[in-house]
Amino acid sequence: MNRTFRVRILGCDYDLRPGESDELHSRWGFMSIQKREIVYATHMDESTIKDTVFHELIHVADLATSTESNELTEQQVMRIGAVLFGILRDHDSLVEWLLKKK
Ligand SMILES: [Zn+2]
């Protein structure tokens, strides 16, 4: 996977893009509220990349709704991300119903 997206979160646009090794520093992904970007490593299988992107989206949601810095711990972000993404991944009809316009 080597795709870029523009993701709107609480009215702010974030660039979601593959990262270079010199900016990732062995991480699977990272996000920056200041730069409005979410960056992921591409050396992993696609399922792991998607897990990583979802994880970073949780970090953005945490920071974008926190009064100071992040309020969720890394463990909390990992658990929320794994559970929510698992629900979305395993329930196509639920996701379709949730996102249906009418
Ligand atoms: Zn994290």
Image (cartoon, rainbow, N blue to C red):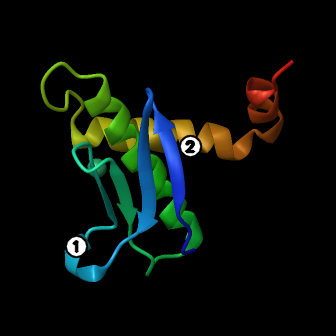
Count the labels in the image.
2
User: Residue 23, labelled with which disc?
Assistant: 1
Residue at label 2?
A: 85
> Which secondary structure, mark 2?
helix
Type of amino acid at the residue the image marks with label 1: Glu
2 vs 1, front mark: 1
Q: Residue at x 12, y 24 (%)?
A: 68
Q: Residues within 10 Å of mark 1 (few under 14, many from 20)?
A: few
Say which label, 2 or 1, has the lower sequence index: 1
Q: Residue at x 59, y 44 (%)?
A: 86
Residue 19 picture location, percent across and down: 36, 72
User: Residue 3, labelled with which disc?
Assistant: none
> For this view, does 1 lie left or right of residue 71?
right
> For this view, does 93 lie left or right of residue 67?
right
Residue 8 picture location, percent across and down: 50, 38
Residue 74 picture location, percent across and down: 24, 43
